[in-house]
Image: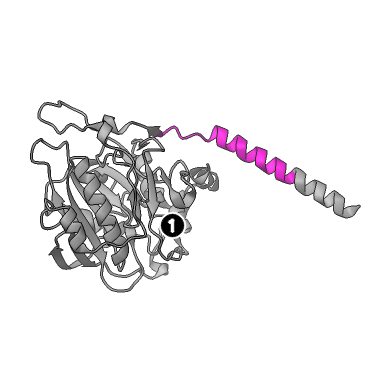
Amino acid sequence: MRGIRIKYVAVQLAVAVYIGLIAFAMFNSCSHCAVTSPKTLMKGPAEGKCQLDWDSLGVREVHKSFVPTEELIQSENPAVKKGGAWAPTNCQPWQRVAIIIPYRDRVNSLLIFLRRIHRMLQAQKIHYRIILAEQAGTGQFNRGKLFNMGFLEAMKLDNFDCLVFHDVDLLPEDDRNLYLCDEHGRHLETATDDLRYHLKYYNYAGGVVAISVKNFKDINGYANGYWGWGNEDDDFSARITESGLLLTRPPELTGRYQMVPHPKNSRASSGNSMFFGWRTRWHSDGLNDPVGMNYSVVRVEEAALFTRVVADIGSPPPSSSVTWDRSKDVSLWWFLSFYYP
């Protein structure tokens, strides 16, 4: 009898939690998120600008298990210039785009990515250059700092208008997902096959993000303080919306990606604690931080299919030296509402 009662109470509790989550989701809609058509990215006078035959674009077969050789990729992309750059010759591109990839020891993923991305960007008539922001050494990976470093080094190569921060293991399925920037922050990866093509949560801005050079500077870039995997993309999302920008996305079916299988990195133990204090730190932890942005370029290599910038970005500071006014941390309610739904 007692066992039946416990089971009954457990079911009631589960139902109550489920109803509570549904209610929370209903009242926690994302007012700063917007789904917009890729066609809206081509704004301004159209005379002389590159126009797309949208009927010829669409979903392409993605070969995420076949590792091509560099020679094969080069033979398929003969017009790509040294350094991984390409621009249309018969029309004026809408923007100059830097594709910045945080990188270390992922050769197979890189080759699979390069074969897909070069063909897609040329189909979109994008003026682009692919830049590997590579971390030297074997220390803890710092994705956010690599993006910041990649941005600074990219601007030495060309006068870019638009930045696309891109993980190397994500392959876009649809050529209609334009790699251009709008006046906000644009999250291009709306759904991925490893998550059964669902968006993780409204505020998610990881994987693939496009943002203009002006807006990237205005929000102080990425945080440099997240060593190890996790939370730097959430910090970046919070900076976007806190500055008054929207987080825009293409329609879910257009923004689909496939993930190249790879070993998962362990999550940084201090990531969530750091994220609680993002609002206190975001004006000082980023591009304008002379200590956090301290790095030394080991070498710059203009390969046939990409530009590689290898840099020593240092190592994590002692945990005791990372301090801020914890009284100004975001609340637990804010933290939970950021991630759900």
Q: Position of residue 321 (x, y in %)?
A: 38, 67
Q: Is residue 25 left or right of residue 35?
A: right
Q: Which residues are magenta?
A: 13-33
Residue 255 lies, with reference to residue 225, above or below; the image says: above
> As rendered, which of 138 and 106 lies closer to the eye?
106
> As rendered, which of 324 and 222 lies closer to the eye?
222
Which residue position is annotated with label 1?
274
Q: Is residue 16 left or right of residue 125?
A: right
Q: What is the tally of numbered marks visible in this picture?
A: 1
Q: Residue lying furthest left in this view?
A: 89
Q: Please name the residue shown 39% across and 32% down the image.
A: 34
Residue 85 lies, with reference to residue 244, above or below; the image says: below
Tell me the quarter of the picture where residue 57 sits: top left
Residue 220 lies, with reference to residue 65, above or below; the image says: above
> As rendered, which of 116 and 142 lies closer to the eye?
116
Does the magenta stretch mainly form a helix, a strand or a loop? helix
